[in-house]
Every structure is written in C-alpha cells, then in structure tokens.
Image: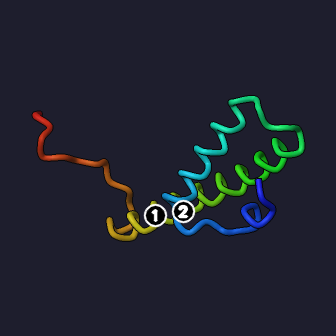
Amino acid sequence: MAKSRAATPPKDYESALAELESIVGEMESGQLPLEASLAAYKRGAVLLHYCRQQLSEAEQQVKILENGTLQPFKTDDIDD
C-alpha cells in the first residue's frame, strides 16, 4: 500500500466503500506482510470513519427533509 494512498482523502462515499472492500479482500487473502497489513488496517479505519460520517450526514439531511423526524421508508409496491 502506497503511503500517498493512505494520506489521500476519499473522493466520495462510493469510492471510499470500494477501496474499503478492496482492502478487506487484500487482508483476507493473508498474503500481506505485517507492515502492509498494519497500513491497510489504518487506511481501512480512516475509510470506515469517513463512510459512517457520510451516512450520518445523509441521515441528518433526511430528517430535515422530513421535518425533524425520520419516517419509515414506504414503497408503492408493498401490498397491505
């Protein structure tokens, strides 16, 4: 894992999630040396924090749009 990759902020949620999935795959392969595994873990922690923050911000925006209360998601194709 390149040092510049570890310091680079994610472009957006989708790219952060894709990179996180890639890191998990690399780590699960068991082929990374210890130092690379530690760097991958640190980068994964940064990406995970970023993704959680993005989701939290999106939830806050939905609450604002729903007048302060989060409403259950309803679809038209559910028969009641």
Say few, some or many: other residues with alpha carbon within 10 Å of mark 1 (under 14 / 14 to 19 / 20 or more).
few
In x, y percent, where is residue 42? 79, 51
Q: Position of residue 51 (x, y in %)?
A: 58, 56
* Nearer to us in this view, 69 or 62: 62
* Residue 54 - label: 2
Residue appearing at x 54%, y 62% in the figure? 54
Are the residues flagged by discs 1 and 2 in contact, CB closer than 8 Å?
A: yes
Secondary structure of the residue carrying numbered label 1? helix
Q: CA distance from mark 1 to mark 2?
A: 6 Å
Quadrant for the C terminus in the image: top left
Q: In the image, what residue occupies the spot 12% across and 46% down?
A: 76
Displayed quadrant of residue 46:
bottom right
Counting from the top left corner in percent of width and height, residue 10 is at 61, 65
Q: Residue at x 66, y 68 (%)?
A: 9
- Relative placement, left or right, of 77 versus 71 is left
> Which amino acid is tagged 1?
Ala
Residue nearest the observer in this picture, 76 or 23: 23
Give the image location of residue 40, x and y in percent: 76, 47
The colour scheme is rainbow
Residue labelled with disc 1: 58
- Closer-to-camera residue (70/12): 12
Horizontal relation, residue 6 to residue 47: left or right: right
What amino acid does circle 2 point to? Answer: Gln
Q: Secondary structure at mark 2?
A: helix
Identify the residue at horizontal 31%, vertical 48% (top origin): 72
